[in-house]
Amino acid sequence: MAPTADPEGAGLRTLGDVLTQEPLRNSIRVLILISLGMNRALAFSDLLELTGTSKGSLGHHLEQLESASLVRTRMVFTLGGPRLRVEITPQGLAKYAELARELARVVAARPTVAERKGPAPGLSRG
């Protein structure tokens, strides 16, 4: 089966355009957005474990995403005490969907190893 046409890596450029928009220029923020897109909400402690960052660093990344209206944080009270809950917003879901759509498009456009006769377009050997 032939791969979907992707002239000159257009899909990669489009994916790159999504990933270079603020605030997604940082891999930790992309990871947070994808995690929340998949789960809708997570505890701050879950995101700490997932990202492997410090509390201060995670707080900074969440501030960036919150200022872009992609996530919102709120304090919830549990039997174990207060916890910070991070939720994805409708704008965040739209950005997550855009990212997932572009990534799926790039994956679908790539030939399989068996179909490939050389390096992927735009990539050089060496």
Image: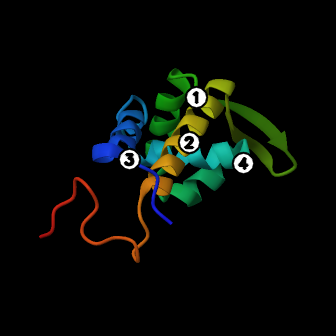
Relative depth, front residue between 92 and 10: 10
121 with respect to 87 (left or right): left
* Amino acid on which disc 2 is placed: Arg
> Nearer the N terminus, badge 1 or badge 4?
4
Dot label at residue 93? none
> Nearer the N terminus, badge 2 or badge 4?
4
Q: How is the image coloured?
A: rainbow
Tell me the CA gap for discs 4 and 3.
Answer: 31 Å
The answer to whether mark 1 and mark 2 are in CB contact below 8 A is no
Whether residue 6 appears in this view of the structure is yes
> Nearer the N terminus, badge 2 or badge 3?
3
Dot label at residue 70? 1
Tell me the CA gap for discs 1 and 4.
Answer: 14 Å
Residue 56, given in percent of the width and then of the height, sits at: 46, 43
Residue 106, given in percent of the width and then of the height, sits at: 44, 50
* Amino acid on which disc 3 is placed: Asp
Count neighbours of disc 1 (C-alpha within 10 A) and say few if under 14, some if 14 to 19, many if 20 or more. Answer: many
Residue drawn 51% across the image and 66% down it: 1
| Of marks 1 and 2, the one in the foreground | 2
> Nearer the N terminus, badge 4 or badge 3?
3
Where is 119 relative to 20, above or below?
below
| Of marks 1 and 3, the one in the foreground | 3
Screen quadrant of the C terminus: bottom left
| Of marks 2 and 3, the one in the foreground | 3
Residue drawn 43% across the image and 44% down it: 57
* Amino acid on which disc 4 is placed: Asn
| Of marks 2 and 4, the one in the foreground | 2
The answer to whether mark 1 and mark 3 are in CB contact below 8 A is no
Relative depth, front residue between 15 and 20: 15
Q: Which residue is mark 2?
A: 101
Q: Which residue is mark 4?
A: 39
